[in-house]
Image: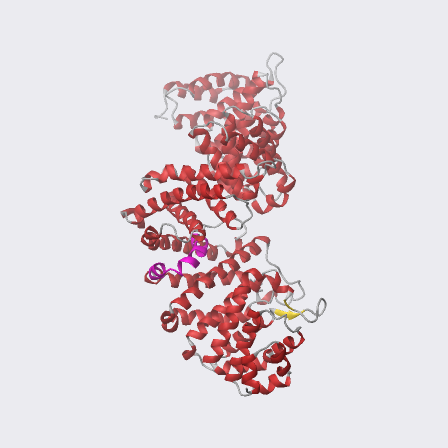
Amino acid sequence: MTEIAEPIKKCVAILGAAKSDTEKFAALFMVTKLVKGKDCTDVAKKALFDSIGFKFLKKLMLADNVPNDCPPLVYKSVALSILTSFCELESLATSKELLDNIPVFYNIIEAADDEDDNDNLTVVTESYKCLQAIAQFEPGQKTLLESGAISKLALVYANKSFQTDEALRIIVTLCSKFGPSAWGEDPKIFNSLVTRIGLDFETDHSDRKFELCTILGTFLFTCRRDVILKTVENEIWPQSVYTGLNDILKSKIGKNQRDPALKLAAQAIELLGVEWTLNDEEKPKQFYLLLLQLAAIEVRMQMDNKSFNQAAGQAELLTACFIILELSVNYMATDQLDLDQKEKQQIYTALKGAFSGVMSVLTKLSTSEARNNLSGKDKSFAAAMVRVLSAWLAQETTAMRPQLYQVLPYMFQLANLTFQESRQYRLENKANLDAAEGPADVLRVMLPAMCHLAVEDKARQVLFKTKQDEVLYECLVFHFSIAHWKRPPVPRAERLKRMNEPEPKPTARQEDEMKDSRAAIVSLCNIFMNLTVLEVKVAEDSLLFSNLLKFIFENLPELKDTPDNLVMHGHLAVLGLLLLKQQAKKVKKNDFTICRYIQATIRFLWDAYIVDESNDPTALVVAMSYKEHWMEIAELWFLGMQTMSGVILQVPWISEFALESGWAEGIIETLRKVKIGTLPGNVKSAFEDLLCQLVEANPDVPAKLKKADALRVCRNHRLMELGKKLFGD
């Protein structure tokens, strides 16, 4: 005990010698003075705590049988005051004795309901201090979560107004630590808590409004989105958050007020969608336009003429503004917002200014020594810049091109890094993907912009020079593994036992991921189509493009024939045709995968148009299963028909598949039913070109078509070229 000061040694000795609780209690008043002195080191505190013993302090906190002249609260107050002092030590704050007695602190907090009673106020304050000390360390955080701290403290906040901000701070600490898993499956706790905070946020016009801004932002960021979005429609808190933010952003405010408001707005938009900003019935666009302008101005202010390090100092605020800008740009692209010319011009000017600032900072980073050594928050911020810039480039296809071509290799580098991290995370957490969000994949967000870039000569040069096509191929393979969901393999020992079990289905989370991966594959196919058509030599000779065609041959026939897969199926099929046309010389007739691929592709092209017997048996219409997606696949279908004709010209033996499947006669039989003069010109050309190529390629085709009554079809629909080939001049 050489490190312990003399007064503390003396106190330890007195506590050790105490023969009764009364004597020990008397010595505690000496302890309360000593622990606040400069001599009380961590070693000294530990010695004092051991000499008091937790059992005795707990006895005081729960004391009911006390002398008449001493209220129970005095015992509780002294015990809690001492515990608070000791809780600063990690060894004590995380000790089993203390953690096992967390419910004691809950009981004190829940039992107190008289704000004017100073004694009550003291014990509740000290209880919160103990809980806050426990919440500073990981073992304490885990125990608090397992003991139901969030639901208990949320109830305290929702029902009372007694020291409740302390309850909120502990909940914020736990949510920040554990993320969505802190909230559990029941949305009631979250909704009741956020409803109460939302009402306070809406009606409070003091500085506390901005504290609540930050708290609400944390809760919206960490909530279980899948759970909350199912119930949010009937809740009032989204309107409260809207009203509170509207009040703040329309007022004269400084940076300290504006920053938390923009961060909260970003979380609300990300959770509830851009539609949430259009809540005002009289002026639905006003708040949306205000928020967009403020976010754009903030980005420009923080990034114009700034270095990466200067901008990164405001990373949290800027990332929130990026979220607002990205989602707003994506929403405007859907044309759901009715903007007049003046509004469009104002938005364009604001966005161009903001994205010029982003481009400027990213360009400086790409030429600095730090570019390859980013880590932690700096790496995340750099990736966020690439992400928001990609959202803009997907819609704005002409702006800032010289700067873009300069910085594009570095954008690819950062995006590829996030893709690899995201893929690795998925591989390592296969068994538990529903538990938490993995790292963000910026390459996925960049794909729509790359569809446009693939059309630009300089951007394509950069793409091939940096071998980005190789990463895009990896990306396609990865997303196909998600989109083409298969039931998990059943261990051999369990197969018999589980034979009669119903077919397992993907979880809600897996279905969302499948949907996103299907969209990613569509974008990737569009990129590769542009590259195939515009870089003919590369598509002919490159090993990568040969492997891409092989991948499509092997995997397209495996896709399930479902409405969800139709658009993806069509894109993969037509990309395969374009590649097959370019690589016709390499194709081997005895390759069985080609056979299955062509059959799957014919199915996509054949099923698109039908004669609807139930409505009008003389009208050619788009099949019902295609109608919902026709905007996405109409051009694709015509390109597919045209390319199939070209493939048959170059690889004549493929015509055998069209004959064996019955497609050639099927076209004639369908057109025979169609009323004269009603066949759309572009559809007529597509069918006629294909049939003409089939006639040229395969001597068995004419007889089959004639037997199906091709003469009548050629006369009815004026298929002049086909008529000449079948029946001469």
Residue 639 visible in rendering: yes
Q: Is residue 389 above or below residue 303?
A: below
Q: How is the image coloured?
A: secondary structure
- Residue drawn where x is 46% and y is 19% of the image: 32
Q: Quadrant of the C terminus?
A: bottom right
Quadrant location of residue 469?
bottom left
**Residue 629, x across and y down, in percent:** 58, 61
Percent of width and height locating residue 72: 60, 18
Task: Classify residue 551 as left or right of residue 729.
Answer: left
Left or right side of 40 for 637: right
**Residue 449 within the segment the image draws in magenta:** yes
Across and down, in percent, residue 501 comes to 66, 63
Q: Nearer the viewer, residue 249 or 178?
A: 249
Q: Residue furthest top?
A: 69
Above or below, 607 against 181 in this view is below
Residue 190 vs residue 447: left or right?
right
**Nearer to the camera, 642 or 485:** 642
The quadrant of the rendering that contains the N terminus is top left
Q: Which residues are magenta?
A: 442-462
Q: In percent of the image, x 52 and y 74: which residue is there?
A: 597
Looking at the image, is 232 positioned above or below residue 688? above
Q: Whole-percent x and y of residue 557?
A: 54, 71
Q: Is residue 562 rendered magenta in the image?
A: no
Q: Main secondary structure of the magenta part?
A: helix
